[in-house]
Each structure stands twice: as C-alpha cells, then as structure tokens.
Image (spheres, rainbow, N blue to C red):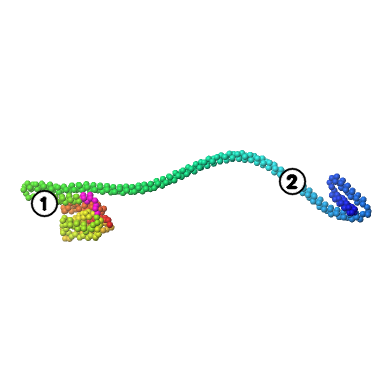
Amino acid sequence: MKNYFNYCISITLLSLLLILMVQPANGSALQASVFTAQSAAIGYLFVNTPENITDIIQSIFILLLSVGIFGIAFSFISLGSKRIRRHNDYLESLVKDRTKTLEEKHNQLKLQNEDYREAIALIQEQKEEIETAQHDVLQKNKDLTEAFEEILSQNELLDYERAKLEQAKRIIQSQNTKLLGIARSLDQQVQDRTKELSHSNNLLLEKNKELDEFIYKSAHDLRGPIARFKGLSQLIQMEYDQKSDISAHLEHLNHSANHMDNMLKRLSNVYEISARPITPQKIKIDLILDTVFDRLKGEENLDAVTVDVNNTVNHPIQIDPSLLHLILKNLIGNAVRFHDPLKLKRWVKVNIEIVDKNMVINVKDNGIGIKKEQKENIFDLFYVGSELPKGPGLGLYICKIITKKLNGNITLNYSDIEKETEFKASIPIKA
C-alpha cells in the first residue's frame, strides 16, 4: 500500500515538474511555488531508499510516458488557448468596432429621436388643428345633413308639385289637342264657309248682273208691244172716228197682246226657275218626253219636220222633272221653229244617254242655222239668232240658267259645211 502511494506521489510530482518545465508560469509567486514543488518532488525521489530503485525506475518510465502524453495534450491545449486568445482579440476588436458603430448609430438615433420629438410635437400641433378642423367638419356635416334632409323634404314637395304640373300639362296638352282639332275644324269650316260665301257672292253678283240685264232687256223688249198697243189704239181711234172698218186693226192688237202675254209668261218662267228650289224625284225620261211633245203640238208645227228620238235611259233617274221638261221643250221647240222650209228633208234628231254619271242631251237639226258672229250671244237674254220674228229670245237663255242651276252646262256645235246645228246639254245625276 505504501509503495502504491509513493508511486502515485512520484507520478504526480514528475508530471507537475514536466509541465512547469515545458510551460513556465507567468509571475514571480507562481514561479516560486513551482520551484518549491520541483524541490519537493526531487527531494522525495531521492529520499527513498535504494531498495525501491526498481520501483522508482518503473515509476519514472511510466511517469515519462505519461508526461509525454500529457505534454502532447498540453501542447494542443496551448495551441488552442492561443487560438482562443487570438479569437478573443478579434472578437474584442470586432466588439469595439461594433460598439463604435452602435455608438454612432446611437448618436444618430438620438438625433433622429430629437427630430422625431420635434415631428411629434408638430404632429401634435397638427393633430390639434386637425381635431379642430374635424370638429368643424363634423359640425358642417351636421349642418349639411340637416340641409340635405331639408332639401329632400323640399324635393319631395317639388316632386309632388311636379307630378301635379305634369298632370296639368297632360290635361293642357289634351285640351290643346282638342282645341287644335276644333281650331282646324273651325278653320276648315271658315274656309269652306268662305268658299261658299265667295261662291254665293259671285253667284249673287252674277245674279245681280243678270237681273240688271234682265230688267233692262225686259223693259226694252216690252216697249215694242206697248208701242204697238199705243199705235194701234190711236189708229183704231182714228178709224173709229171716221166710221171705218177696224176689224183688221183689232186682229193686230190681239196678236200683239198675245205676243206680250207670251213674253210675260216666259219672263215669269225665268223668275220662277231662278227663285224656286230644286225638287228632284225618281222619274222615267219617256214620261217627260210625252209631256214635252203634248205641249209642242199646240205651239209648233211638228208636221213640218221629222223628229227622231233615241232615248237609251230606260230606268228612272233622280232629277227635277219640270226643269228637265223646260230644257227638252225649248231645245226641241227651237229646232222645230227654225226649220228651213226650202229643204225637202227637214229633221230634228234627239239623243239622250248616260255618260260618266251625266245625262247628256243632244238636239241636232238641219234648219236655217246660226251665223258665226251669233255664236257668242246665242244664250243671252232676248237674243234671237234669226231675222225671222218667231220668238222672244228666251228659250236658250232658260236652258242655260237651268243647266247651270243643276250644276251642268250647255254648248253649241255648228257645222258651216253641213249647215247642221247641235246643242249639247250635260247634267250630273245621282245613282
């Protein structure tokens, strides 16, 4: 046991000695301690007795081996320590640099903090201004909201009023449309009435002109029979005073009276034709022709001419029979009255037909004819186209006013070569 303890002590001391030899410590106190330890270790080695020398040698060998191992390990440790110191120095320099950088950053941050404080102070001021402005805005928003609500209320009222106005506008437009229609109708009525009045005025002027002409010519033509009456009366008075035969004069007086009576009847017919209204009725033309020839037998010499009638209108027509009677009587009567006694064949051709809703009457004869200069005046009042005193000159005038009253017309066609006279009357009829 003792040997083992000594062996351990020896190893420990030698190891310590070798360590101190390889790497001396820094500082005088440490060197003194090491030197003391070295002395103790050497002394211990040499204090032991020679009988233990073998054990000592063995211990030294083991110790040397251990020292070699520990030396190598310590060398590695020493190298690691240097590296650690160098790394520490690097870290210290790095820390210093970082510290300097951090200080600069810190100074910058302090400056920035001051700027931030100023900015914060400015922001605070602006915040207060903004809050004040915000308060004002809120107040204005409130006012605007109230105003908006009032505007909405006004808009609702305006919408209601607008709806009423639209309704009133529609009513007014409807009334305007009706009034426009009435105005147009009235305007058309006024125009139609104006045309009617203008037409009536023209007719009245024409009637007045005809009346003036009628009165003038009537007075002029009636003077002839009256003058004959006066002359015959004076002649009869003279013959009567002388106890002469007055029968011939009385015959002349009677003839003049008949002539004047006939003229007055025709003048009365002219007035009646102009004044009385048209009274149309359904009648066949053959019946009217029969009454015409019955009247002509007592007034004209029908045996002196050949009268040929061609009536193609076999159905009843709507017309005033008395007016149609006068037209046929005067046209046929004139053709018979003014026949040419020098001709062997004396004829009158009457043709009646319907053409385009018009009744067309053609009366053609080969009588004494009409002179060229007489054509324009042949339908005038009291105009006689022949030099023979065979009538008062009212027949064709009556035909003209009747056809005009029936909205028709009458024309004269005369052939100078064939010496034929043709009167054509066209009268519109209703179906």
Q: Which residue is mark 2?
A: 95
- The relative height of residue 418 versus residue 160 in the rendered view (above or below) is below
Q: How many marks?
A: 2
**Residue farthest left in this picture:** 243
Q: Nearer the viewer, residue 139 or 329?
A: 139
- Magenta stretch containing residue 276, yes or no? yes
- At 14% from the left and 51% from the top, the residue drawn is 258
The quarter of the picture where residue 115 lies is top right
Where's residue 27, x and y in %?
Answer: 84, 45
Q: Is residue 239 left or right of residue 108?
A: left
**Residue farthest front in this picture:** 1
| Disc 1: CA contacts within 10 A as few (<14), some (14-19) or many (>=20) | few
Report the amino acid beneath label 2.
Val
Where's residue 343, x and y in %?
Answer: 17, 59
Distance from label 2 to label 1 (Cα)?
A: 181 Å
Q: Which residue is mark 1?
A: 251
- At 74% from the left and 46% from the top, the residue drawn is 95
Residue 411 shows in the view = no
Instruction: Identify the magenta region.
Output: 270-280
- At 16% from the left and 51% from the top, the residue drawn is 262
Report the amino acid beneath label 1.
Glu
